[in-house]
């Protein structure tokens, strides 16, 4: 899979129509939410589903829904525990190494993941499931970023929309802050102004006085790390799926 450069992403994603009915219907779905639905997957926009990794065990159901691709956000430990051999037989499986931490840098990856999601659902009869351990923090954050770009809306609107489809989402505070920070970044790129990701990275490094901060994920990103992030390096995984967090919060941005 070849990924377009970050600077060109905004020209690829088409501007979707901001439909009041679409967003109103999403909000209405919250009235029908049941607690046990957190273990299921929900279709956020046509062709893009969101949910927990445990739902991937139901291979036949995913096939019946027409899902052809799976994008899974896991940390190093989960990558060793989650078994994906069966998934790779039936789906195009991409693994993204991301920790559910306030310190995890996500902004630098939003354009590429948004492009990947759009690349899949724009394909003929292609659908994607975006998941993480509980389907509550990491994967919803990337889906929200995608909704922001494709609908040209702010983080709060996108958050409300996605939560209207999957009530149990609850990104950590660091992820919520990064979604807000991403608003002017993606809007500037759509206008063809603003720094590139490499320029932003250099600016952040110049502002840092503590050299240890350069070790933070994303601060010293190199091509090998990007390749690894996008799941292009195969990993042998054994063991059972980690437990899904049973609790959730409906806190909004």
Image: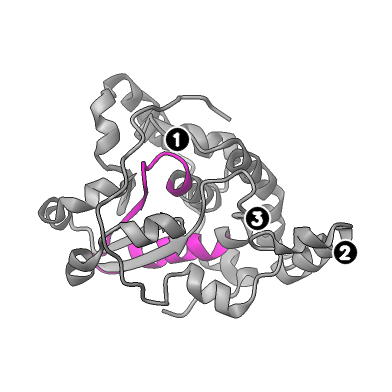
Q: How many marks?
A: 3
Q: CA distance from mark 3 to mark 2?
A: 22 Å
Residue located 65% across and 55% down the image? 186
Report x, y in % for residue 252: 54, 27
Residue at the image point whose x is 72% and y is 57% from the top: 188
Per the image, is 133 magenta? yes
Can residue 118 be seen here? The reply is no
Asked whether the beta carbons under mark 1 and mark 2 sit within 8 Å of each other, the answer is no
Measured in 3D between alpha carbons, the distance from the residue under mark 3 to the one under mark 1, in whole angstroms, is 19 Å
Numbered mark located on residue 161 in the image: 1
Residue 241 forms part of the magenta stretch: no
- x, y percentage for residue 40? 24, 39
The quarter of the rendered structure image containing the C terminus is: top right
Give, as a single range, the part of the protein colored magenta. 111-139
Identify the residue position indicated by label 3 in the image: 186
Task: Work out which residue is located at the far top of the displayed protein and give it.
Answer: 31
């Amino acid at each position: 899979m070849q990924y377009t450069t970050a600077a060109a992403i905004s020209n690829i994603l088409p501007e979707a129509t901001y439909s009041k009915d679409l967003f109103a219907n999403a909000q209405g779905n919250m009235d029908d939410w049941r607690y046990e639905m957190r273990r299921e997957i929900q279709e956020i926009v046509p062709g893009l589903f969101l949910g927990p990794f445990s739902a991937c065990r139901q291979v036949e159901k995913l096939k019946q829904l027409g899902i052809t691709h799976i994008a899974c956000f896991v940390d190093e430990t989960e990558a060793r525990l989650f078994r994906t051999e069966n998934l790779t037989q039936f789906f195009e499986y991409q693994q993204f190494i991301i920790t559910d931490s306030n310190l995890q840098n996500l902004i630098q990856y939003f354009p590429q993941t948004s492009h990947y999601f759009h690349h899949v659902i724009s394909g003929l009869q292609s659908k994607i499931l975006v998941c993480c351990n509980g389907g509550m923090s990491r994967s919803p954050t990337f889906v929200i970023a995608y909704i922001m770009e494709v609908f040209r809306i702010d983080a709060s609107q996108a958050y409300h929309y996605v939560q209207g489809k999957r009530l149990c989402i609850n990104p950590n505070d660091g992820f919520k802050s990064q979604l807000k920070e991403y608003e002017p970044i993606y809007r500037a790129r759509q206008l063809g102004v603003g720094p590139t990701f490499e320029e932003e990275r250099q600016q952040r490094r110049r502002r840092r006085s503590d050299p240890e901060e350069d070790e933070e994920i994303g601060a010293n990103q190199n091509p090998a790390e990007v390749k690894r992030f996008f799941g292009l390096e195969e990993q042998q995984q054994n063991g059972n799926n980690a437990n899904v967090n049973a609790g959730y919060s409906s806190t909004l941005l």
